[in-house]
Every structure is written in structure tokens, then in C-alpha cells.
């Protein structure tokens, strides 16, 4: 139990700079709560100025961390101003270590988080936002980082109609979760991942070295979604070189035009990847394929 706490503290130190409060953007951020099955969740809503009716919505799921930060933007808010979409930042309730997190199958937290229904909360949240603010019922997208990326895989498999497309940065699938998933509907999905990630390891953690439970290899997690989509071909190219080479694997030919993208950051760590690519722009480029 102590070892998993140390692991997560390491994660916080590794990507802590990514989680600074985002004060960028010209719009407004408001705080809200929503109780679901006896658990109270907090979420923050960023709305650009002069946002049009039926505007797109992006829901951003944070990674595992202890600090209560109201507006974790990953630099997305200027993008939202430019492109005309709102952003919702839900905050997972605290676990017994005092860290905000999402229920994704971590070994030490399985029993503790069993009563929680994070996926059900997300489904309710999206419907509430669409109803109350008139956001588009189709152009709603999910973006998760680390623990939040792991949640994106689960929502994509168990409640695929919630979002038009999904993106994960440094996400993963725990083996205990993978063996219970029974996804049946194709979903557009994108993963950005460093091959030297010490936490969500590129080749997985089959021996539970981090004492949080075993997780599967990143290419296999992406392949699971690509196979579900019946993708038929892989297109590969490289992004302009910055710090680390980024290889873009695009699995195409899926049902209803769905694609699955894997951005392999060669030598990349457990971070947002901005030193090697313009992550938010690449993610938005993926999402715009599914705007309508």
C-alpha cells in the first residue's frame, strides 16, 4: 500500500508542471457540483466569450493527483477561444491517500472505489451540460491525461455514445479492466504516448512492478480499439522533429469512417508531450474529423 502511494507521488512530481492552474483564455470559468449515487463531484466549466448556440464541448479528465486545482487546461483555453468550444474539467473525488482520481482498476483502490460509478457520473454530466447550456449533442469530445486517459478507454468501451471521439495522453488499460471489457461499437480514438514512460509503460507492466496491478502494453490497448472499429490499414508518418521523434500511426478504414491514431513519442516520458509536438493542436485536428 505504501509503495503505490510513493508511485503516485512520483507521478505528481513527474508531471506536476503540467497541472498548473490555467489562467489563459478570455472566457470565464465557473465551479459546479453534481451528486451521483451518493458521491459528490466537482466540475469546472470554461466558456469563451460570445460562444454560439450548439457549440462543441470538450470534457477533460485529469490525472491522479492531490492538489485541488480548479482549472487544469493543458493550454486548451486559447484553443477553445479560437475554435469556439466550451471545456468542462470534472474532478474525481479523493481517495484515502488524499488524491483526486478516477476508478480505473488500480489494485490498492479496487475495494475502496467499488461503490463509485464514475462512468455513470460522466454520462449524467454530459447530458446535464448539453441540456443546461445548449452544447452540441453530437460535437462532444473526451480528452484524458494519465489516470484520466485510462478512464477514456473505459467510457469508450462501456458508454461509447457519450462522446463523438476520444483522446488519451499517457493513458493505459489495467489488465483487470481489460479482461472485463466487452465493447461492441466503433469509436474514434487517439493515444499520445512516450515509449520511455516509467508509469504507464509502453510495453505494459505484466509483473506488477509498480504494485498498482498489471496493465497491458500501449500498442495492444490501441489495437483493441482499432480492431473493434474494424480498421483495415495503417498509415505511418513522422512529425517534424523537435525534442523527440513522433511517429504517427493512423489506423484507417474503420466502420462508419472511424479511425484510431497512435502518436508514438520515441523516448518520451509521462507527460503532455509539448516539447516534441503541439499536442493540443494534433488532438483538435483529430476531433475535427468528427465535427458535424
Image (cartoon, rainbow, N blue to C red):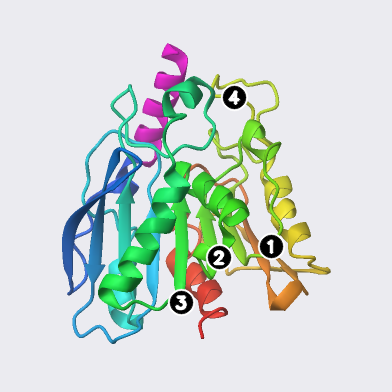
The image quarter in which residue 226 lies? bottom right
Q: Which residue is mark 1?
A: 185
Circle 3 packing at 10 Å, graded few (<14), some (14-19), many (20+), is many
* Residue appearing at x 47%, y 72% in the figure: 284
Image quadrant containing the N terminus = top left
Q: Are marks 4 and 3 in contact (CB under 8 Å)?
A: no
Q: Which residue is mark 2?
A: 161
Whichever of callouts 3 and 2 sits on the residue coming sooner in the sequence is: 3
Whichever of callouts 2 and 4 sits on the residue coming sooner in the sequence is: 2
Question: Which secondary structure lies at badge 2?
Answer: helix
Circle 2 packing at 10 Å, graded few (<14), some (14-19), many (20+), is some
Along the horizontal axis of the image, is 28 left or right of 179? Answer: left
Whichever of callouts 4 and 3 sits on the residue coming sooner in the sequence is: 3
* Mark whose residue sits in front, 4 or 1: 1
Q: Which residues are magenta?
A: 1-15
Q: Which residue is mark 3?
A: 139
Question: Which secondary structure lies at badge 1?
Answer: loop
Whichever of callouts 2 and 1 sits on the residue coming sooner in the sequence is: 2
Whichever of callouts 4 and 1 sits on the residue coming sooner in the sequence is: 1
Judged by its main secondary structure, the magenta piece is: helix
- Choose between 184 and 232: the one closer to the eye: 184
Q: Which residue is mark 4?
A: 213
Q: Are marks 2 and 1 in contact (CB under 8 Å)?
A: yes
Circle 1 packing at 10 Å, graded few (<14), some (14-19), many (20+), is some
Real-space Cα separation, disc 3 to disc 2, in angstroms: 11 Å
Amino acid at each position: 500500500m505504501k509503495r503505490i502511494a510513493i508511485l503516485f507521488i512520483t507521478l505528481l512530481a513527474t508531471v506536476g508542471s503540467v497541472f498548473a492552474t490555467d489562467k489563459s483564455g478570455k472566457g470565464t470559468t465557473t465551479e459546479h457540483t453534481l451528486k451521483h449515487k451518493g458521491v459528490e463531484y466537482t466540475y469546472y466549466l470554461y466558456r469563451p466569450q460570445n460562444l454560439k448556440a450548439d457549440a462543441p464541448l470538450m470534457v477533460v479528465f485529469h490525472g491522479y493527483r492531490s492538489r485541488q486545482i480548479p482549472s487544469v487546461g493543458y493550454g486548451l483555453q486559447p484553443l477553445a477561444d479560437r475554435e469556439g468550444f466550451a471545456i468542462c474539467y470534472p474532478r474525481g473525488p479523493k481517495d484515502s491517500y488524499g488524491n483526486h482520481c478516477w476508478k480505473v482498476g488500480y489494485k490498492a483502490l479496487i475495494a475502496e472505489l467499488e461503490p463509485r460509478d464514475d462512468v455513470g457520473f460522466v454520462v449524467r454530466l454530459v447530458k446535464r451540460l448539453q441540456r443546461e447550456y445548449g452544447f452540441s449533442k453530437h460535437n462532444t469530445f473526451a480528452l484524458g491525461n494519465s489516470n484520466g486517459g485510462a478512464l477514456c478507454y473505459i467510457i469508450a468501451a462501456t458508454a461509447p455514445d457519450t462522446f463523438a471521439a476520444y483522446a488519451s495522453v499517457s493513458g493505459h488499460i489495467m489488465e483487470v479492466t481489460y479482461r472485463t471489457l466487452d465493447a461492441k461499437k466503433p469509436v474514434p480514438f487517439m493515444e499520445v504516448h512516450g515509449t520511455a514512460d516509467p508509469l504507464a509503460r509502453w510495453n505494459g507492466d505484466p509483473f506488477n512492478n509498480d504494485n498498482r496491478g498489471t496493465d497491458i502494453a500501449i500498442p495492444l490497448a490501441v489495437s483493441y480499439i482499432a480492431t473493434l472499429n474494424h480498421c483495415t490499414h495503417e498509415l505511418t508518418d513522422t512529425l517534424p522533429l523537435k525534442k523527440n521523434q513522433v511517429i504517427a500511426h493512423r489506423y484507417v478504414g474503420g466502420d462508419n469512417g472511424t479511425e484510431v491514431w497512435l502518436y508514438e513519442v520515441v523516448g518520451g516520458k509521462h507527460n503532455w508531450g509539448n516539447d516534441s509536438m503541439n499536442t493540443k493542436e494534433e488532438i483538435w485536428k483529430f476531433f475535427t474529423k468528427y465535427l458535424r
